[in-house]
Image: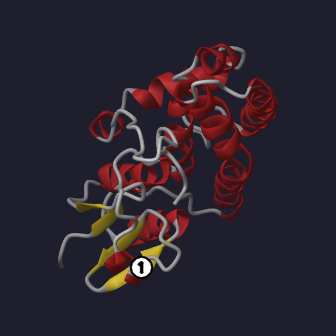
């Protein structure tokens, strides 16, 4: 069985989510760089892997996937290693709920509207940042209310929900407003400190880079 291939950029939030899953499963993989901000545009060959030109994409023994949640579920189910999804229906539904919530409400607000706007714009849009912070507060309140007793979001065992949340929070706490807001939620802050210490997180850490078009740290869901 050949090792899986991840296509994407190491600065991407969603590429990192896939890489975290692979690292937690103990799977050797290849990261093929795809820079969506390249001066020459997205490579033409990449559209055979992802018709929308977004990252990540994934391939394993000729089987191709795109969309982060589909990839991480495949990684968990197709390979040996610690399980990253609950077996029982209700915990698994909670995991899926958290992931969907993060995609729908947290990612844009925390990463783009707050972190990228504050870090990358010469003149940040303060109204956009304020709106992003309001959405981030609602997200953190919801995440706190959903968090189970124990070290991880679903309790005793690390799951895909934790791996989905961690790269988003990582960008958010790069800015002072993000750190201050997170500090208001002691349970989520403690969770963040815990997951940030995992070897998989350290191994996949990459400082953001400036895009060729000056559009900022390219952390986006692609």
Q: Quadrant of residue 47?
A: bottom left
Q: Quadrant of the N terminus?
A: bottom left
Closest to the observer: 167 or 95? 167
Relative vertical location of residue 91 with respect to residue 76 in this rendering, above or below: above
Relative vertical location of residue 83 with respect to residue 195 in this rendering, above or below: below
Name the residue that disc number 1 marks: 47
Residue 151 seen in render = no
Residue at the image position 36 percent from the left and 57 percent from the top: 39
- Under circle 1, the secondary element is helix
* Mark 1 residue crowding within 10 angstroms, few (<14) / some (14–19) / many (20+): few
Residue at the image position 54 percent from the left and 48 percent from the top: 164
Left or right for 187, reference 32: right
Residue at the image position 65 percent from the left and 32 percent from the top: 149
- Count of marks, rendered view: 1
Residue 132 location in percent, x, y? 75, 33
Colour treatment of the image: secondary structure
Closest to the observer: 23 or 35? 35
Residue 97 location in percent, x, y? 72, 55
Left or right for 157, reference 105: left
Residue 118 location in percent, x, y? 60, 25
Relative vertical location of residue 187 with respect to residue 9 in this rendering, above or below: above
Closest to the observer: 126 or 16? 126
Residue 5 location in percent, x, y? 27, 68
Residue 28 seen in render = yes
Residue at the image position 23 percent from the left and 61 percent from the top: 29
Left or right for 191, reference 30: right
């Amino acid at each position: 069985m050949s090792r899986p291939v991840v296509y994407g950029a190491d600065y991407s939030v969603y590429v990192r989510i896939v890489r975290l899953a692979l690292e937690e499963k103990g799977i050797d993989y290849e990261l093929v760089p795809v820079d969506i901000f390249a001066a020459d545009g997205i490579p033409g060959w990449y559209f055979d892997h992802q018709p929308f030109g977004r990252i990540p994409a994934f391939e394993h023994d000729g089987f191709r996937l795109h969309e982060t949640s589909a990839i991480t579920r495949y990684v968990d189910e197709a390979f040996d290693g610690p399980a990253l999804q609950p077996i029982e229906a209700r915990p698994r539904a909670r995991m899926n709920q958290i992931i969907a919530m993060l995609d729908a409400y947290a990612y844009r607000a925390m990463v783009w509207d707050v972190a990228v706007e504050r870090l990358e714009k010469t003149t940040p849009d303060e109204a956009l940042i304020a709106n992003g912070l309001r959405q981030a507060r609602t997200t953190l309140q919801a995440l706190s209310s959903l968090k189970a007793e124990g070290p991880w979001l679903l309790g005793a065992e690390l799951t895909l929900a934790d791996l989905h949340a961690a790269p988003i929070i990582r960008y958010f706490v790069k800015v002072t407003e993000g750190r201050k807001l997170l500090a208001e939620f002691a349970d989520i802050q403690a969770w963040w400190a815990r997951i940030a210490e995992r070897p998989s997180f350290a191994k996949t850490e990459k400082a953001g880079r400036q895009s060729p078009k000056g559009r900022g740290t390219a952390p986006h869901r692609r």
